[in-house]
Image (cartoon, rainbow, N blue to C red):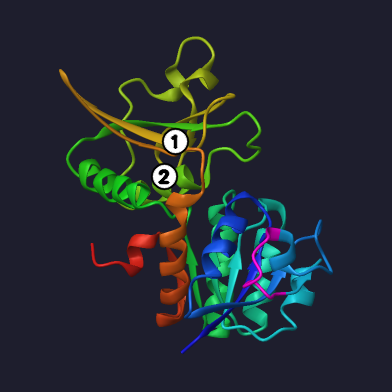
Amino acid sequence: MIIRLCLAGATGWAGSALALALAKTPDIQPVSAVSRTHAHRNLGEVLGEPLLDCPIYATTEDALAQPCEVFFEYTKPDVAKSNVLAALRHGAHVVIGTSGLTDDDYVEIAAAAEQYQRGVLAVGNFAMTVVLLQKFAEFAARYIPQWEIIDYASDSKKDSPSGTVRELVHRLSTVRPSELTVPLEKTQGIVETRGARMSGSQVHSIRLPGYAISAEIIFAMPDQKLSIRHDSGSSAQPYIDGALLAIRKVSTFTGLRRGLDTVLEI
């Protein structure tokens, strides 16, 4: 069975890499794409790949007029939620690759997924090394009560923290909150230098030139430390295999799942 796909953000950095991979993926067929800057053109023409014979639309609503089984959200945080809700109303399953959505956003999306009996798979980062970082961190948090998270990205990344770290924080919150030897309210000096408290974890975001997406979590006990870190390179290649897997798996369940590992046997 061929999966018909609508790809929002098809000409962006990650979206274009996924689109080019789809041209060589026989079981997934892009039938529409969303890109305001390239609307009313053909995706294959824009990306230089003649196998991508797919019209580009300016809005998600227009693109969803083409029937599809799966909608892939790869745009920006300020429009991602409305795109996802529109896709669910149109009867599509949804894969979310856009970062920056909040826990409250996901509560609303989860309710809509149940209402329309569709699957939504939200993945902050499709790289397998991130999947393993999240699983290893959950395991470590059961035994080590103190940790802090460092979130690295380029100076041009507007959302903070990254989707990778938001997902990591969410997962750790289901295990336990991290312990603080000195409570934040008893900090002497500028409390903001201790980072942001997010669902029981301390998070520090760095935005500087020269960084791609990286995430590090440091666990510590007296006289011992454990660091788990993921570093992205300069290409979107690490995300492609995970994105293809997500497209194939999202129709196998109903409701919201967060993290690629929720559809893997690990």
**Image coords of residue 92 (percent x, y):** 59, 81
Closer to viewer: mark 2 or mark 1 = 1
What's drawn in magenta, residue-wise? 47-54
Discs 2, 1 touching: Cβ within 8 Å:
no
Q: Identify which residue is drawn at 59% across, 64% down.
A: 19
Q: Toward which corner of the image does residue 54 lie, by quadrant? A: bottom right
Distance between mark 2 and mark 1 Cα atoms: 14 Å
**Image coords of residue 48 (percent x, y):** 68, 60
User: Is-magenta flag for residue 48?
Assistant: yes
Q: Identify which residue is drawn at 80% across, 60% down.
A: 38
Principal SS element in the magenta part? loop
| Mark 2, residue position | 169
Q: How many numbered marks appear?
A: 2
Residue 255 seen by the camera: yes
Residue 222 seen by the camera: no
Badge 2 amino acid: Val
Circle on res. 195: none
Mark 1 Cα within 10 Å, few/some/many (few <14, many 20+)?
many
Mark closest to the chain's N terminus, 2 or 1: 2
Examine the rendered structure and indicate whether residue 171 appears above or below residue 38.
above
In the rendered image, the quadrant that contains the C terminus is bottom left
Badge 1 amino acid: Ser
Please identify the residue farthest to the right as the structure is shown.
Answer: 40
Circle on res. 214: 1
